[in-house]
Image (tube, grey):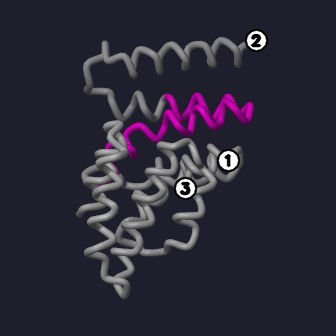
Amino acid sequence: FLALLGRALVRAKRPRDARLILARLDAALKPDNATDRSARALLIAELALDREEPAAAFEAIRNDIDPVLAGWRQGLLGKALAGRGVLDSALTVTAEFTRSSGFGVDTQADWVLAPLDVARIAEALGDSATARAAMQTLLDRWKDADPDLRILRETRLNLARLQRDARR
């Protein structure tokens, strides 16, 4: 998939190269193929989020219903909604993505970290219980990982802070 290469380039902070991949994707796109159209829209959304344009990201994928890349779309939709400030919807979409079976598919990296997005959104909404549960989900997913990983240390510290605040 050219689009997945484009996504990797965007996330590696190489948007210029990702736009070149998008141009190649456009040249090879089969207009009657829903997955091709979906892949193109998702790469456009990735580039928009990289430019900090969540409204453009949302517009790129709002009519996309192709099931093949649904996990990628769901992860991006949560980010686009959060970026637009539609936090209730962002929480719903991101929490649903977290509960999906994302391990072993092309969205695995997003899925494994999605509980942190849920926690951030929930905390912004003042929902400490959901934020704590999401952080615990992340720690449970990573229970066999090196406990000194920065992401795990930070999650444990934030979880402890929220637990202290809940007891007050």
The magenta-colored residue range is 106-135
Report if residue 168 is visible in the image. yes
Provide the residue designation for mark 2.
168
The 10 Å Cα crowd at callout 2, few under 14, some 14 to 19, many 20 or more, is few
Provide the residue designation for mark 3.
57
Residue sitting at the far bottom: 32
> Could you tell which of marks 2 and 3 lies nearer the N-terminus?
3
In this view, 10 is above or below 143: below
Secondary structure found at label 2: loop
User: In the image, is residue 78 part of the stretch drawn in magenta?
Assistant: no
Comparing labels 1 and 2, the label whose residue is closer to the camera: 1
In the rendered structure, the answer to whether residue 77 lies left or right of residue 19 reads: right
- Identified by mark 3, the residue type is Ala
> For the residues marked 1 and 2, what is the alpha-carbon distance in whole angstroms?
32 Å
Closest to the observer, 129 or 114: 114
In the rendered image, residue 13, in percent from the top left (x then y), is placed at 35, 37
